Amino acid sequence: MQERTLAIIKPDAVERRLTGRIIQRIEDEGFQIRAMRRIHLSTREAEGFYAVHRERPFFSSLTRFMSSGPAIVLVLEAPDAITKWRTLMGATDPARAEPGTLRKEFAQSIERNATHGSDAPETAAHELGYFFAGIDLV
Ligand code: CMP
């Protein structure tokens, strides 16, 4: 059964001109890109997106980073898309990411880790709705 997940190519990767290589990997893995947009989040918008992490020590640094420059948001579709995209990204901390994963290849640190992906179906529904309207996905 097809599933959708939210992917973000984060400001570190966009700034380093890695967008094309990351999108190529997404397509090579068989995802359909159902929607895609370039955005530059405000601090408040980044805080809203990462609200579940607001008590974490890295929250203010994370939201500053995520609003520091443009990012690309995408809706990816595939069977088991949530797990499949998390596998392709690799662990949050690039030091722990498997060889061949996007974060192993492209992340600079646990914060500047190149990509984001939803971690569960409920999170994916919420995160997709944060950036995309139903009409964008027709
Ligand atoms: P992401 O998958 O987008 O989810 C939360 C983000 O917080 C994470 O990727 C990193 O960019 C950032 N972050 C910074 N420090 C940490 C940390 N110690 N643990 C988890 N996430 C962190």
Image (cartoon, rainbow, N blue to C red):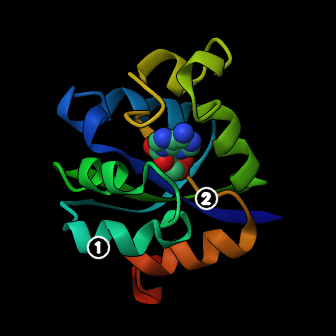
Q: 106 or 22, which is in the foreground?
A: 106
Which residue sits at x=51%, y=73%? 128
Residue at the image point whose x is 33% and y is 56% from the top: 60
Residue 42 in view, yes or no = yes
Write down the residue under mark 2. 118
Which secondary structure, mark 1?
helix
Q: Residue furthest right?
A: 1
Q: Which residue type does callout 2 highlight?
A: Ser
Q: Quadrant of residue 89?
A: top right
On the image, the x and y values in percent for residue 119 come to 68, 57
Where's residue 114, x and y in %? 40, 35
Q: Of all residues shown, which one is farthest toward the top?
A: 99
Point out the tag, 1 or 2, that comes first from the N-terminus.
1
Question: Disc 1 vs disc 2: which is toward the camera?
Answer: 1
For the residue labelled by badge 2, is the local secondary structure a helix, a strand or a loop?
loop
Of 128 and 76, nearer the camera is: 128
Which residue has dot 1 on it? 45
Q: Is residue 111 left or right of residue 30?
A: left
**Which corner quadrant holds the N terminus?**
bottom right
- State the residue at coordinates (72%, 43%): 84
